[in-house]
Image (cartoon, rainbow, N blue to C red):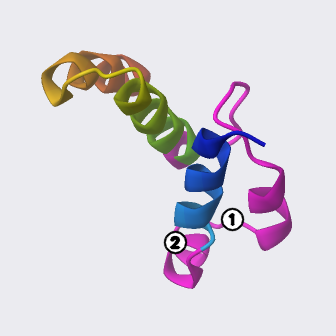
Amino acid sequence: MSKRDEILREILSEPDILSKYNLKASEVEKLTTNPPYFNNAVEILATVINENDNNRTSRQIYPILKNIHKI
């Protein structure tokens, strides 16, 4: 398990986040920061984690997130 996956799982395992985004603890245990994603919130968070780890700035990440939402 990579450090990126650990960060993603740690963030999404919070009870408030689980209930807000209709996630199950069993689903969170299997998540990775690699596609395919089953939830838009997971995709956004995984993208931010991956791009930050690739030393991208917020300004560089923003267009990627816009593309995910098709804004």
Q: Residue 45: percent from the left, percent from the top?
A: 47, 44
Answer with left or right where residue 15 lies relative to residue 65: right
Instruction: Tell me the distance, in whole angstroms, between the alpha carbons under discs 2 and 1.
Output: 8 Å
Q: Nearer the viewer, residue 48 or 54?
A: 54
What's drawn in magenta, residue-wise? 14-41
Q: Is residue 4 left or right of residue 34?
A: left
Q: Does 17 sit above or below residue 35?
A: below
**In this view of the protein, can residue 39 be seen by the observer?**
no
Which residue is nearer to you in this view: 37 or 55?
Answer: 55
Dot placed on the residue nearer the N-terminal end, 2 or 1: 2
Q: Tell whether label 1 touches label 2 (CB within 8 Å).
A: yes
* Quarter residue 56 falls in: top left
Residue 28 is situated, as x and y percent measured from the top left of the image, at 74, 59
The foreground one among 22 and 35 is: 35
Q: Is residue 40 magenta?
A: yes
Q: Secondary structure at mark 2?
A: helix
Q: Which mark is residue 34?
A: none
Residue drawn at 66 percent across, 44 percent down: 5
In this view, 20 is above or below 3: below
Amino acid at pointer 1: Leu
Residue annotated with mark 1: 23
Disc 2 marks which residue?
Answer: 17
Q: How many marks on residues?
A: 2
Q: Residue at x 42, y 30 (%)?
A: 53
- Any part of residue 24 in sight: yes
- Residue reaching furthest to the bottom: 15
Q: Secondary structure at mark 1?
A: loop
The residue at the point 58 percent across, 83 percent down is 15
On screen, residue 56 versus residue 41, left or right, reads left
Residue nearest the observer in this picture, 54 or 12: 54
Mark 2: which amino acid?
Ile
Q: Residues within 10 Å of mark 2 (few under 14, many from 20)?
A: few
